[in-house]
Amino acid sequence: MSQHRHPGASGSAGAVPALPDLPEATVARLPEYLRALHHLAEIGHETVSSEGLAGAAGVNSAKLRKDLSHLGSYGTRGVGYDVGLLVDQIEFVLGLTQRRAVALVGVGNLGHALAGYDGFASRGFRIAALLDADRARVGEIINGLVVRHVDDLADVAAEEQISIGVIATPAPAAQAVADQLVAVGVTSILNFAPCVLSVPEGVDVRKVDLAIELQILSFHEHRKASLTALPATGGSALTALPGGLPAPDTQEAIGT
Amino acid sequence: MSQHRHPGASGSAGAVPALPDLPEATVARLPEYLRALHHLAEIGHETVSSEGLAGAAGVNSAKLRKDLSHLGSYGTRGVGYDVGLLVDQIEFVLGLTQRRAVALVGVGNLGHALAGYDGFASRGFRIAALLDADRARVGEIINGLVVRHVDDLADVAAEEQISIGVIATPAPAAQAVADQLVAVGVTSILNFAPCVLSVPEGVDVRKVDLAIELQILSFHEHRKASLTALPATGGSALTALPGGLPAPDTQEAIGT
DNA sequence: AGGCGCTTGTGAAGACGTGCACAAATCGCG
DNA sequence: CGCGATTTGTGCACGTCTTCACAAGCGCCT
C-alpha cells in the first residue's frame, strides 16, 4: 500500500479540502488509470509517459493527459509521470485513502460471489456486512462474515460507518432495500438488480446489469452479421421486421 | 414477409435490409427500454406513452422518443406506442430474435455465479458451455452443464454457434483466453477480468469491472463529504492533494 | 553553457449527446 | 363533421467529450 500524506492537520482553517470538479467521463476513467499504475509499479516502473500509461489503460494519450491535468497533476515534461505520486493523487481524489465499508444486501447467487470477490478487498473496500431478507439464510457464514437480516440494517449502520450499499437482490425487492439503505444514511448505491431505483436527490446510484451488457454485444453481433451476409439474400432473417401485428397500414412504402 | 419499413420523414434512399446505424448511446439504452416494456406488458399495458415508458426506464421522455425514432419505430400520435410491437422491434434490432449461445470461461467465484444467473436465460441468451483452465475443475457440473477444459474451445465452437464469449478468469489469464476466443471466431466478448484486452479490429469487447464501479461511487462519496465538511471553501481545491513529494512549491497556499 | 530531443499541458475545432419547444398527427366527443 | 386534447417526431441550440496539434518546459549530452 502507499503511504498517503493526509492533507488534514496541516492547514490551520479547513481540514478537508474541496475536490476539483472533475468531468464525469474523467472520473469514470481514473480507476482504470489507477489499476494500470498499480500494475506498472509492481513491475518496477518509477515513471511512465502519458503514452505508456494510456496504452496500459486502453485510452488515447491526449485524453489521459487532459484527464490528469484536471486534477492538477504534475507530470514532468520530457520525462513523464511519477508512478507513486500519481497513485497517491488518484487514490486521494477517489476517496480511497480510507478503506470504505460496504454493506452487501442479497446473498443469493450473485451476492454470494460478490461476497467472495477479492477484487473489492484489494482495491480499497471492505465488505462490512452481509444482509438478506430470507431468514433461512440469516446466520450463514460466507467468507468469514455472518449473514444478518436486512431489518438489522440500522444496527449495522450504527456499528460501522457504511459508505456504500450494494444491492444484489431480485428486482422486486430492490426498491425496498434501497429505501432502507437510504433511511440509514447510505448515499451511494451499486445496484445489480435489473430495475430502476428511485432515490432522493443527493443519493448516487450506479447500475450494473449483466444481461444488458450482453444485449449490447448482441446488437453489434447482429449488425456485423447483417453486413457480411449482405447482398441480395432477401430471405435473411434480417429483412423481416416483426411487423405481424395490427401495424398501421402506413407501410406501403416498400422499397425497391 | 419481407416488408421493410423506411424510417419516416424524408428521403427514399437505400432499401437495404441492414440495420440502421444507431448512436451508441441509444443502443446502450434500448435494453433498458426492453426490460421496462416487458414489465409493462406483464402488468397488462397494451400501449404506453413516451412519458410513461421513459419513467419506467429512468430516462427523460424526449430522449426516449429520439431513441425510438432512430429505429424508425411507429408510435401513434395522441396515443403512444404499442407495447407488443415495440418489444418485437427492439428485440429484433438487438438481435434477440434468436437465442444466442454464450461460452463462459472461468468458473471461479464470479463465473460460478454467472453460470447460475437466470437473468441470462430469461433475456435472450443460453449458456452453451462452461470452460476453465484448471483441470481440477473440469468435469464439475454447474447448473446442469459440465465444465470443460478451455483447450476444448475449438470443439465447443464446432458444436455450437457461439455468439458471445464471457471471460470471468483472473486478470493474468484473460488475454490468453481472449486470444483463444478470437481464434475460434468469437467476435463479441464480455470481460469481467480487471485488465485491458487487446483484440483485432472487428471484435467487440465490453468490460465490467465491479471494483471500478465502487471506486466511482467512492469519488462521489468523497466529494459529498468534502462539501458538507466545509460549506464555503472553494478556492484552493488542489492544494492539499497528496503532493508532499518533491512537488513544486505550489502547496504553500493554505488560504485564510 | 547551449542545443536537442522528448514529453507535458492546453487552446481550438469537431463530434457527439441532450433537452427544449413546437408543428404535425391522431383520437374521442359533442 | 369539426374541434380540442393529447402525444409523437424533430429542428435547433446548448453542453460535454474527444482529438489534434503545437508551444512551453525539462533533462541530457556534448
Image: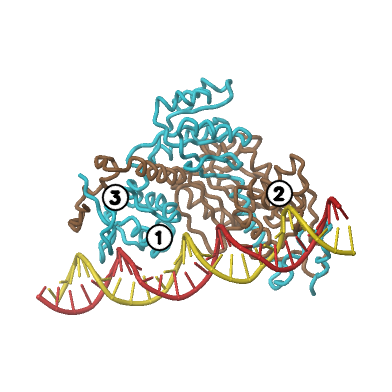
Chain colours: A brown, B cyan, C yellow, D red
Disc 3 crowd rating (10 Å Cα; few below 14, some 14-19, many 20+) is: some
Whether residue B60 is visible, yes or no, is: yes
User: Looking at the image, is B253 positioned above or below residue B83?
Assistant: below
Question: Of the residues shown, which amino acid type is indicated by label 3?
Answer: Val
**x, y (%) of residue B191?**
54, 40
Q: State the count of labels.
A: 3
Label 1, on which residue? B55
Question: Of the residues shown, which amino acid type is indicated by label 1?
Answer: Gly
Observer-nearest of B142 and A245: A245
Q: Are marks 1 and 2 on the same chain?
A: no
Question: Of the residues shown, which amino acid type is indicated by label 2?
Answer: Arg
> In the image, what residue occupies the spot 37% across and 46% down?
B94
Label 2, on which residue? A99
Q: Is residue A48 left or right of residue D6?
A: right
Calculate the distance from the C-alpha at mark 1 to the C-alpha at mark 2: 36 Å
Question: Which chain is disc 3 placed on?
Answer: B
Secondary element under disc 1, as helix, strand or loop, is helix
Splitting the image into 4 quarters, where does residue C29 fall? bottom left
Secondary element under disc 3, as helix, strand or loop, is loop
Quadrant in the picture for the N terminus of chain A: top right
Calculate the distance from the C-alpha at mark 2 to the C-alpha at mark 3: 55 Å
**x, y (%) of residue A138?**
56, 38
Label 3, on which residue? B16
Calculate the distance from the C-alpha at mark 3 to the C-alpha at mark 1: 34 Å
Tell which tag, 2 or 3, sits nearer the viewer: 3
Disc 2 crowd rating (10 Å Cα; few below 14, some 14-19, many 20+) is: some
Observer-nearest of A21 and B120: A21
Question: Which chain is disc 2 placed on?
Answer: A
Earlier residue among tags 3 and 1 = 3
